[in-house]
Image: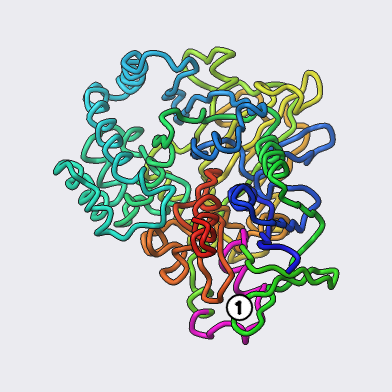
Amino acid sequence: MDYDVIIVGAGHNGLVASFYLARAGLNVLVLEAKGMIGGSCVTEELIPGYRFSSCANALWALRPKIAKDLALNERGLKVESRLALRLLQDGRYLLTGSLTHGDAAVELLNVQNEIAKFSAADAAAYPRWREFTTRITRIFGPHLLEKPPRLHEIYAGCTDPDDKKVLDAIMTNSIADLADRFFESDVMRDVGVGADIGDPHDVGSGLLFALMTAMGEYTETGAGVDNGFVQGGMGRLTQLMGQAVSEQGVVIRTHAAVTRILIESGKTSGVELASGETVRSRVVISNLDPKRTFLSLFAASDLDYRFLDRVRHLQTHVAAGLKFHCALSELPEFRVVGGLTEQQTRNALFFIAPNRAYRIAAWRAAAVGDLPAEPIVSGSFPSLFDPPLAPNGRYTMSAYVLWAPVRPRRGTWSERRAEMAECLIRMMDRYTINFRRSLIDYVLLTPSDLEQRNFLTDGNIHHVDGIPSQLLWQRPMEELAHYRAPIAGVYLCGAGTHPWGEVSGAPGHNAAHVVLADMGKG
């Protein structure tokens, strides 16, 4: 064998997996089809002179244990804290978060004062909501860096009867039901809704909310990782990961697309590259999504047709979205009552989704193949806190846009790209005073673009949707939930495995430890 382990794809999860395997003494090769490492966690010059975090655009949920093990802070990782700016159509806004990490009681009071602009009752209820999310974190957090638990195992970990009641509520309610137990105002009744949740009234949407909450708040090491904007863009994070794995002896090859996982006598023997080269190994780990892995990298005769049919039917359309990157001549000024300070604008992750009805309308349009007339937009101005991303006196804006159909029912994305971009420009004009006149150029990445340039089936940034039937012991499906493929020596380590997507590193960590255990090194 040329290597003990080959990892297909140098995204952040593949890099994390390679680190732990190499640290245990294995000879590891990472193969990346593109010319740089990072997968969807990269910084790219999409417009001449302007650099963007082209897919993953902010750091959130990176596991503290992984950051510590890879010594990312010591290597120079710098993260700018962010504020959450919820924009409403009448000029009001909700601004939450802290730039100082000061006294928790003071920060709680500041949030309550913001909420009180909309409802005194909601402000009074907010501490109970925080207690609720703290219990959620305690319930689900310990399972993030472990094999995916079954439901009875989660319940067994609830020693507090009130924790069991919270778990009952999570498993049997929608996120809309949960929010309505605490809040009365439109702005707060839309709390807790994440990118994989389509209709917030769907029963089971509370489960993804619980996992997202735990990923954002649980700390394994006693000290968390700052959430926010990475200096140098998200590619800086994977560059530092690349340093860590190289020090462990991992070999990384770019421009090395894998076209086939080789199988001999019922187990893997390595991979074949687009160049025709064969590289042999005892183990192959795919950092690609499950559909691309099993439907593209194997001969059909290598896998049971019933298994392949289940893979084909994995749901991969809820998380479809757009990436809207803009070069600007001046900083847009939000149409908000009282205005914002320069610091608030600098650190704001702005969010356009005024209420639940707006969110549901955007989802229903995309679900039937239509482009949403009123899309949900979450964005920031990265060059404000990281000036080298843009030329002197110029600015960048990056936004994640929901929802978007994987394939429009009328026309194609290439035909309708300009139409969708104009819709977004009009929307930004409604929420800012000067967006259109400041716009120099833009790049709109559609689900089709994300599929082709980032190798994401259906443009799904989380590989498979975070619906209840594709979470925990069923992520992405039951026979793959422990990271093992149905062929000896083949594993998954990408966002389509437990616990979920985002730049957490948890799937890579967990897959590596399963491989080590199977090889007797755990």
Q: Secondary structure at mark 1?
A: strand
* Residue 371 visible in this rendered orientation of the protein: no
Q: Residue at x 40, y 59 (%)?
A: 471
Say above or below: 130 vs 516.
above
- Mark 1 surroundings: few (<14), some (14-19) or many (≥20) residues within 10 A: some
Residue 463 image-quadrant placement: bottom right
Magenta highlight on residue 304: yes
| Viewer-nearest residue: 4 or 349 | 4
Chosen colour scheme: rainbow
| Viewer-nearest residue: 150 or 75 | 75
Give coordinates of residue 336: x percent, y percent: 50, 20
Q: Residue at x 48, y 13 (%)?
A: 338
Give coordinates of residue 197: x percent, y percent: 42, 51
Q: Amino acid at mark 1?
A: Lys
| Viewer-nearest residue: 197 or 10 | 10
The segment highlighted magenta reads 286-307
Query: Which quadrant holds the N terminus?
Result: bottom right
| Viewer-nearest residue: 267 or 52 | 267
> How many labels sit on residues?
1
Magenta highlight on residue 127: no
Residue 512 image-quadrant placement: bottom right
Residue 46 image-quadrant placement: top right
Q: Is residue 282 left or right of residue 154?
A: right
* Residue 494 visible in this rendered orientation of the protein: yes
The residue that disc 1 covers is: 267
